[in-house]
């Protein structure tokens, strides 16, 4: 996503008094809402939870509280979640450790794209990933403010270096063993592209 005009709000930790997933998600959703305007809806939510909590139940509750958010991603962790507040986990009364974190991106201008691809293990897969990245960049560029574009680099197929490229934030999520090849491909793409 392009970080200009984008707001990020986080809420972390399983509330000690929460007796259910609904209560825990509700508590964190209220915390998120206290940091943004009442009508704001996240464009994207990343949910992290411990493996002691059912991700499907978490996703259902998050969707109930943020019905206008189309892109919600959930990932589990063995014991807790690493957040901007550190590694968090709560020892609950039933003896189980639980953790939960919401990372919400509010993007009122729509300067956000998603890319999904196969692991980048072959030249064909890398090329496909680069094509997806090109598509996403061109889509972001189309809606970007003129001040972020370099008119001298206005090639609709492959624009060159411009301020927009310096405002990009890229979030990568992958299965074990897929992150490093994806980062290598992203690094190479960025250096060739810009």
Image (cartoon, rainbow, N blue to C red):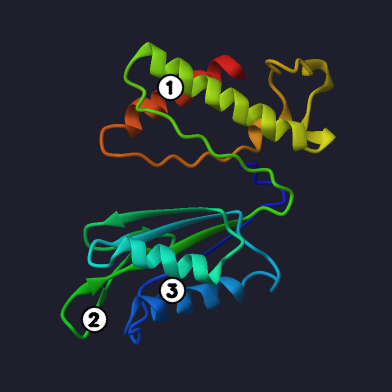
From this view, report whether residue 194 is shown above or below residue 58: above
Frontmost residue, 5 versus 143: 143
Q: Where in the figure is residue 130, as x and y percent of width and height?
A: 51, 20
Mark 3 nearby-residue class (10 Å; few <14, some 14–19, many ≥20): many
State the SS at label 3. Answer: helix
Secondary structure under the numbered disc 2 in the rendered image: loop
Residues at circles 2 and 3 in contact by the CB criterion of under 8 Å? no
Going from N to C along the chain, the mark reached first, 3 or 1, is: 3
Q: Mark on residue 185?
A: 1
Q: Residue at x 43, y 22 (%)?
A: 185
Label whose residue precedes the other's in the sequence (2 or 3): 3
Q: Residue at x 68, y 65 (%)?
A: 40
Q: Which residue is mark 3?
A: 25
The x, y position of residue 125, in whole percent, is: 40, 19
Q: Secondary structure at mark 1?
A: helix
Q: Is residue 45 above or below residue 188?
A: below
**Which numbered disc covers residue 152?**
none
- Rendered-image quadrant of the C terminus: top right
Q: Residues within 10 Å of mark 1 (few under 14, many from 20)?
A: some
Residue hosting label 2: 92
């Amino acid at each position: 996503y392009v970080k200009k005009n984008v707001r990020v709000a986080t809420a972390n930790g399983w509330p000690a008094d929460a007796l259910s997933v609904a209560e825990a998600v509700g508590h964190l959703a209220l915390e998120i809402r206290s940091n943004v305007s009442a009508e704001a809806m996240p464009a994207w939510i990343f949910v992290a939870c411990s493996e002691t909590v059912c991700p499907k139940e978490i996703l259902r509750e998050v969707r109930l509280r943020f019905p206008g958010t189309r892109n919600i991603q959930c990932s589990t962790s063995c014991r807790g979640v690493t957040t901007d507040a550190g590694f968090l986990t709560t020892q609950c009364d039933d003896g189980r450790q639980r953790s939960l974190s919401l990372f919400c991106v509010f993007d009122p201008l729509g300067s956000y794209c998603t890319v999904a691809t196969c692991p980048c293990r072959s030249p064909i897969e890398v090329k496909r990933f680069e094509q997806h990245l090109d598509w996403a960049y061109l889509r972001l560029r189309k809606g970007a403010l003129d001040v972020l574009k370099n008119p001298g680099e206005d090639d609709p197929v492959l624009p060159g270096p411009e301020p927009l490229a310096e405002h990009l934030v890229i979030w990568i999520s992958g299965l074990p063993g897929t992150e490093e090849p994806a980062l290598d491909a992203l690094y190479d793409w960025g250096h060739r592209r810009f």
